[in-house]
Image (cartoon, rainbow, N blue to C red):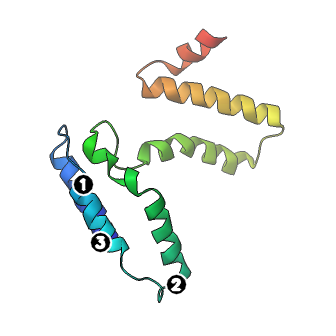
Amino acid sequence: DVQTLLREAIHLRNQKTYEVIPKDSWLTRLDELLKKNLDNMRNEFNEMKRGIIRCRDYIFNFLENPAIPSDNNGSERGIRKLKVKQKISGCFRSDTGADAFHALHSIADTAWKNGQSPLKAILALV
């Protein structure tokens, strides 16, 4: 199934960390899986299939470019603080406050990801 195919591709990337791995054979295998008729399945499966077809050309980019992560954990980690803030306070008191918080968070997070001091990055812009 598609999940197994993705797991195999991620496993291969983890084994060959710095190699460029052609994605053509992986796309062929994916296409074979996507040809299966899902009309008898629940609508969610057909929606997922359409979503995979829409982004088909990008699914295995992490194989050809070792700099591309195979997951979105970094992105999810980036918004985790925002969700915690929202859960604790419920909301922002104004749009201006929300915009300022998000701008500062974005600057600090980008600096941290680039190995720089978040505080120095914010102070450099002030």
For residue 2, side relative to residue 78 (left or right): left
Provide residue 4's location: percent of width, then percent of height: 27, 68
**Cα distance between the residues tagged 3 and 2:** 20 Å
Image quadrant in which you'd find residue 113: top left
Provide residue 83's location: percent of width, then percent of height: 62, 48
Provide residue 39's location: percent of width, then percent of height: 48, 85
Image height of 69 relative to 56, above or below: above
Q: Are the residues tagged 1 and 3 within 8 Å (C-beta)?
A: no
For residue 118, side relative to residue 68 (left or right): right
Screen quadrant of the C terminus: top right
The kind of residue on which mark 2 rests is: Arg
**Cα distance between the residues tagged 1 and 3:** 13 Å
Screen quadrant of the N terminus: bottom left
In terms of sequence position, does the residue under pointer 1 or pointer 2 come before the other? Answer: 1
Residue beneath the point at 83% across and 39% down:
93
Image height of 32 relative to 118, above or below: below
Mark identifier at residue 42: 2
Q: 74 or 16, which is in the foreground?
A: 16
Residue beneath the point at 75% across and 36% down:
98
Q: Secondary structure at mark 1?
A: helix
Between circles 3 and 2, the one closer to the viewer is: 3
Residue beneath the point at 67% across and 51% down:
87
Q: Residue furthest bottom?
A: 40
Mark 1, residue position:
24
Mark 3, residue position:
32
For residue 91, side relative to residue 22 (left or right): right
Q: Secondary structure at mark 2?
A: loop
